[in-house]
Structures are given as structure tokens and as C-alpha cells.
Image (cartoon, grey):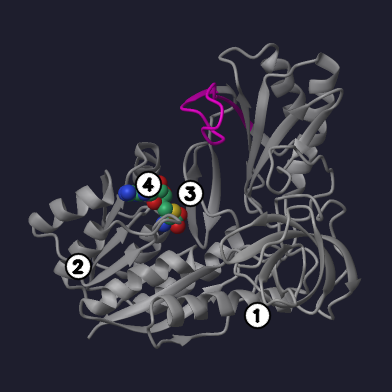
Amino acid sequence: MINLDKGSKVKLKIVDMTHEGKGVGRTEDGLAVFVDRALVGDTVEAEITKMKKNYAEASTVAIIERSEDRIESRCPVSQRCGGCDLQELKYEKQLEMKQKKVKDALSKLAKVDVVVEDIVHAENIENYRNKVNMHIGYDENVQIGYYERGSHNVVDTDSCNINSEVSKKVAAVAKTWLEQNKIDCVRHIVVRDSKKTGDTMVIIVSGTKKMPMIELLSDLLVEEIPEVKTVVQNINTKIGSGILGEKNRVVYGEGYIYDYVGNHKFKISPETFFQVNTEGMELLYSKVMDYAALNGSEYVYDIYCGIGTITLMLAEKAKMVYGVEYVEKSVANAVENAELNNISNVEFYAGRAENVMPDLYRDGKVADVVVIDPPRKGCEKRVLETVVKVEPKKIVYVSCNPSTMARDIAFLVENGYRAEKVQPVDMFPMSSHVEAVTLLVKA
Ligand code: SAH
């Protein structure tokens, strides 16, 4: 086995990219090296950071020859910041990479032969996020931003180009205030906004139950930034447990905001899931509707329905839609959202899909079409087994993780479905993440 010492430097020609956006080079001995921040076509000096069994990991020390696909970074901290991984890659090359990622997952992992349609690109590649999670670090100054790649050091910047404009205003006000008042219990600030209603929610995540003078910070945010309609304190005392803790306390306003997806209005609470790119979501869900091709007579399942975004769209074209979701607050929002939009042909079931689906099937709730939009880890086997028993004519599988999508599609193909077509959608410009919708029909 070839061994390279950690810290040693090698010159590499980058010949490919991994699905995570790293450059792939080979040493003279043929060892594959995955290089952070290197692009296909670059020649780089790389420093070995980790030696694995069959490959090495490295970081870029210097670019010796620039790839033709490389552009000047739009971001001053892109070399360090973990928020994005493709800031230096031309947008059309980002799209090519994501198209390939979806294609490879289906052909190599799922081993299914399926048409992958051309990726739908984003209309706006900057400032697209409707939800920004900012981490806070303290030394002599306060830092607000994303974590550095591979660490929990906060990269302070006031010019992030994927974050919403309003989140940058919030960051600036909060940073000065925290410094002036010497408050160091705020661990994160989450900003959720709607470009359509202009409403903004600020969630101040404190590591302590009480946060001194939070009302003053809240008043200042409301005064300085007119878009701020509500401020919520979230308490998260457990280190390493994700961004939001379990307890929310409304400090100002109603504790929720509204956004629109298409014509539907949605109530969004701090803890509920909502895709981070509203425009991208509309492109993605219109593809879901194309693939579902409903005529008004169908019974439909929407599994992993969140606050009912896809459910309500489906309901406009179906006879009846059953939504399944395990976050109670999301289900409560989904019920309200249906009422808010005068939609009554929907029923929501709270609980884990793997438990709820077998119960619904036992109760005879069949479906002509099943939409599945699981979290990154994909579906529990029991969900897929039940879907197969339900025998829908069509399954529309929406995913943010091509590998788990491929695994689940392979299962459905082995169990009586044919994968007809796949549509990748770029919801996350500058990052290597990609969404995809797959249409499966009963074989
Ligand atoms: N379709 C929705 C949400 C998709 S994200 C939308 O487009 O907005 C995935 C959703 O699955 C989240 O709302 C998450 O809370 C939910 N979820 C995750 N694991 C689950 C499980 N085991 N059972 C039911 N819901 C689950």
C-alpha cells in the first residue's frame, strides 16, 4: 500500500470531481487523492490531511495552474468557509456536476436504466436562501457566520452571497449589540424570511434558559430592520445537539411568518421544515405535479409532507390527499395551511411514516399515486414495503440525496415498478447539493 505522511505535500493534476465537490488527483504511484477546494483542470500543490485505506484526503495549498472552469470567487472567505463548496466553479459546470451526480447514482448505485432529464437551473444563484443558520463565536470580538470547513470555528463575514439580504442586516445589528453588551450566551441566530410577503423571523438561540436583555436586542432588531415581524428565543442548552433546542419563547410578534409557494399561503414556525430556496421549490414541485399528472379522481399519499407544501398542490388536482409527517408542529401547521387556503380534501396523520403507513394500509386507505419526499437518509424499508403493497399506479420520489434515492428506487424497481424519468433541479447554487424527482410507474 502506498502511504503518504500527513502534512506532506504533493503536486497533483485534478482529473475529476467527487460528488461532494472535491477535486480528484492521482499521485505518480496511482493513489487517488481527494483535494478540498481543487477543481477539475487545476494543477495544485496539495497537503495531505488524512490517509485512508485506498485513498488520501488533502487540502489545496496553492494553485499552480488554473482550471478553465475556475472563476474569481464572489466570496471573500470561500477558501475557508464551510457554507458552500463550489464558489469558484462556473455555474454551468456546477450544473454539469450535479447532473452527473444524479445520473451516476442511478446507473452505478441503483443500476437502473432511466432517462435523466437536463437539470433545471436556478433563476437566482445569489442571495437565494430563505433560511440562514448563523453560528456565533466569541473571543475579543464576536464572529457571526458559517463554520469553517471541518471545524466549529466561525468564519465571520458580512458579505455572504447565498444568504438573504435581510439576514445580513440582522447579523450586523446583532454582532454590534452582543459586543457592546458583552453578552456571550447566544449560540446561533436563525433568520427565516419570505421574499414574497417581506416577512422576517429572527430566532435567537441561547445556550442558557435566561438571556439577559433579550427584549432590548429584539426591540433594536425590530426598530432597525422593518422586515422583522417576529423574534423568538429558542433555548438549546445541549452542546452538539443541532441548532435548535426544544423550547421556543416568543419575544416579539406572533412567533411565525407567512410565505407563498405558487398561489398557496403557508404559515411557517421556527421548528418546521420549509425548503430553503422558495423559487427553487416552485420549480421542483411543478415537476412533481407534471410527473403525478393528476386528473381529479385520484387518491394520493404525500409521505413526509412537512407543513403540507406539496400536499396542497396535489389536493388542487386530486380527489383526496393523505399527508404523513412526524413533527407535530408541522402537522399542526399543515392543518392550518389547508384551512388558510380553503382546501378540504386533505387529511394529515402525525407519526413516523414507518408506523403510520402500515396502519393506513390496514385501514384500507389505498392510493393511485404516492409522493415520497424523505429526509437525507431516505425511507425506512417498512415505508417502501407498504407503498408496494398499496400498489399505486405511480410513485413520485423527491429527494435531496441521490445516493439514498438510488437505494430506494432500486428497491421499488425490484418490487414491481419501472423508473421512467428523473428530473434534477438545482436548488442550492454554489453548493454540491442537488434535488431530484423520479417518476416510477407500475410495471
Ligand atoms: N414535503 C415537505 C417536507 C420534506 S422534508 C416539503 O417539501 O416541505 C422531509 C420531512 O420528513 C420533514 O418535514 C421531516 O420532519 C419529516 N420526517 C423525517 N423523518 C420522518 C419519519 N420517519 N416519518 C415521518 N416524517 C418524517
Q: Looking at the picture, how far across and down is residue 160, in whole percent?
A: 79, 50
Mark 4 to mark 1: distance in Å? 36 Å
Asked if the residue under mark 1 is in contact with the one under mark 4, i.e. CB atoms within 8 Å, the reply is: no
Magenta region: 230-249
User: Which circle, 2 or 3, is nearer the viewer?
Assistant: 2
Secondary-structure class at tag 4? helix
Q: Which numbered dot is residue 367?
A: 2
Amino acid type of the residue that numbered disc 1 sits on in the rendered structure = Glu
User: Which circle, 2 or 1, is nearer the viewer?
Assistant: 1
Q: Which residue is mark 4?
A: 334
Q: Is mark 3 within 8 Å of ligand 1?
A: no
Amino acid type of the residue that numbered disc 2 sits on in the rendered structure = Ala
Asked if the residue under mark 2 is in contact with the one under mark 4, i.e. CB atoms within 8 Å, the reply is: no
Residue at coordinates 64% horizontally, 34% vertically from top-left? Answer: 229
Q: Which residue is mark 1?
A: 96
The C terminus: image quadrant: bottom left
Secondary-structure class at tag 3? strand
Left or right of residue 259, residue 337 in this image:
left
Amino acid type of the residue that numbered disc 4 sits on in the rendered structure = Ala
Q: Which residue is mark 3?
A: 266
Q: Which numbered dot is residue 427?
A: none
Q: Earlier in the sequence, mark 2 or mark 3?
A: 3
Mark 2 to mark 3: distance in Å? 25 Å
Q: Looking at the picture, how far across and down is residue 67, in whole percent?
A: 84, 78
